[in-house]
Amino acid sequence: MPSTFSQGNFPLNVESIKHTIDQNPEWQLEEQKPLPQKKVTMELLDHLERLALVDFRNWEGVERLEKAIQFADQLHEVNTEGIEPMDSVLEDRCLYLRGDNITEGNCTKELLQNASQTAEEYFEAPPGNIPLPKLEEHESFLQDSN
Amino acid sequence: MAKPDVNPAIQDGGAHGFLSPAAGFRPGVVSRVSTALKEGQVSPTELCQRCLSLIKATKFLNAYITVTEDTALRQAEESEKRYRRGQSLGDLDGIPVAVKDNFSTTGIETTCASNMLKGYIPPYSATVVQKLLDQGAVLIGKTNLDEFAMGSGSTDGIFGPVRNPWSYSKQYREKCGQNSHLENEDSSWLITGGSSGGSAAAVSSFTCFAALGSDTGGSTRNPAAHCGVVGLKPTYGLVSRHGLIPLVNSMDVPGILTRCVDDAATVLGVLAGHDPKDSTTVQDPFNPFKLPSVIDVSKLCIGIPKEYHIPGLSSETLAVWSKAADLFENAGARVIEVSLPHTCYSIVCYHVLCTAEVASNMARFDGLEYGHRSNMDKSTESMYAATRREGFNDVVRGRILSGNYFLLKQNYEKYFIKAQKVRRLIANDFVNVFSSGVDVLLTPTTLRDAVPYVEFIKEDNRTRSAQDDIFTQAANMSGLPAVSIPTALSEKGLPIGLQFVGRAFQELQLLTVAKWFEKQAKFPILQLQEMLDHADALSHQKISLSS
């Protein structure tokens, strides 16, 4: 059974809507507009790696960030004067708060069973308050983890 | 297992007679199966076993990460007992469903297709999963996706890419003059779109009757369009996100993938409603609805956003979109051009907001309480860093880093707050259009039909997402409900979908319009047999190669 939209079935009588959809395309999907290249310093990269606790791994990662910034810079073309930022589409509603009653709990076993290292009822972590090494020392430090 | 006698309900043109090609358009597949179950024409166990064997036969699609064979059969048996007692729980009782692997499922591995969660077994189920199970649905498996739902191809997960079932369809192979050179076919298979590609492929290839996806920028609607199934993104706040491993808290929504609009309404009826465990669900009472069978669109006003006509749109999709507008007008609806002026900034805005929220959401993965943990133990910080380095792929790491950049003190106002302001402008565009008398918007879902995998991977994930999300993600920004309906086959014999966007919480109206359109479009059924033959041939080839 031929579908309504099977090839060659179009009546091509789209007069009424032709002007709507057949107009020249409105705008271009442009990836990179020619904006001044953002300077991403080594200091910034190190800072981001510490904050994110994720590393760029190689220069490809850095390039990816630079492209992402360039892409995001297009936002500055938009006039947002007098516009409030929008956190949530449900901003006009009251956030639901339930009564302060205990409805669940006592699941220590379940919560601990997914952790790789536990001791009694604790999640075990390596010593804290030791900052990540400086950028120059990165390579040797992270190699140990592979 | 003894082959059952040819059962009129399960014969003719495929594994399930409910898809008889002669029927063309089949309203309410789930309700028909449900009737068949009630009348004893088929049993839940039989149905379950058929789906399981079809999953095995279509393994090459790589749609499933986990197939929950034992639990599914157990659930099917329970369902059978209920039917025998005449106490079925509802339309979904005994119906095999699949769930995207970023929804937590008690006792069943939930990976998000990432090394970070490989082997992670949640101690609880997502609310939407529990609701399906409470209705007696049979959970047949967890489906494949892009890692942490980041992507538009379902190609970037650790379990490999998902193949579009239409790659093996009679329709595609005839149009592309495919012969049985298996090597050629094997390298020219098409993507499903993403990130809920596994769920879309599962529904499309008849291995389940409905599947859950997630939709943050179009991740349910995009693969729905490419796989020729219905993909619904409900209004933000209508369906609980509790248990959906979050990507962007202010935009994520569980998505519903089915073979027809009636089924989407059925599943929505089960899932929607306030959840005390998700404070972003609205408290308004939700009344499940059944869509009318007789629909009159003559009083409707359909809006065609002019900014959605962009150069990258394929001429075929443009023609289909145009023809759809005609259909409505010929039926008496008022079809008008509307403007969403900030459309061209929505991708950029999404890019900033998404990466910022991702940076925050991914912070929970540190190796301590669950998931992958690195052997590095010099310090907590270094353990976290190494764990995240080992657990996340480049796409995820890239978004985390970008997000953190936009959230830096010196950038917060310039990028994050700015993007939030632009978001309001985009949301207001929709408010303006809908308050001017438009009931529903009609747009394409994707730029074109599905592309071959080898072509898709030539561009990186971010570029692809920026291109592919273009029609879908404004609905996430504004929180509005949207649905992709399979409309026509392209010249290559591949599905083209069109999208309807509705007013907030007006899913009844949206789906009614979609159902009317679905009836008019009469989208053809995927011709399954070829795919099974291919699978047969593949396995024979493997046997001969190994001997």
Image: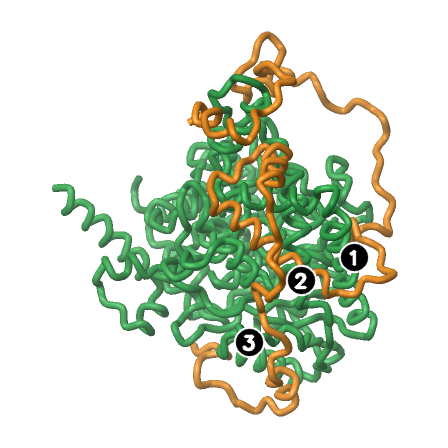
Vertical relation: B333 (above or below) B340: below
Distance from disc 2 to disc 1, alpha carbons, whole Å, reads 14 Å
Q: Label 3 near label 2: C-beta < 8 Å?
A: no
Residue for point 37% across, 55% down: B15
Q: Amino acid at mark 3?
A: Pro
On screen, residue B124 above or below B491: above
Q: Quadrant of residue A84?
A: bottom right
Q: Is residue B186 above or below residue B382?
A: below
Q: Chain of mark 2?
A: A
B144 displayed left or right of B256: left
**Chain orange in the figure, letter:** A
Q: Amino acid at mark 1?
A: Lys
Image position, residue B42 (x, y; %): 45, 48
Q: Secondary structure at mark 3?
A: loop
Chain letter for green, please: B
Amino acid tagged 2: Gln
- Is residue B135 among what the camera can see? no
Label of residue B421 in the image: 1
Answer with left or right where residue B393 lies relative to residue A26. Answer: left
* Helix, strand or loop at mark 2: helix
- Quadrant of residue B299 within the rendered picture: bottom right
Judge by depth and name the residue closer to the eye, B290 or B183: B183
Circle 2 residue: A74
The residue tagged 3 is B311
Q: Residue at x 52, y 58 (%)?
A: B463
Task: Write the residue at 54% across / 43% down.
Answer: B396
Residue in the foreground of this view, choosing between B386 and B336: B386
- Side of A56 where B531 appears, left or right: left
Label 2 in the same subunit as label 1: no
Disc number for residue B3:
none
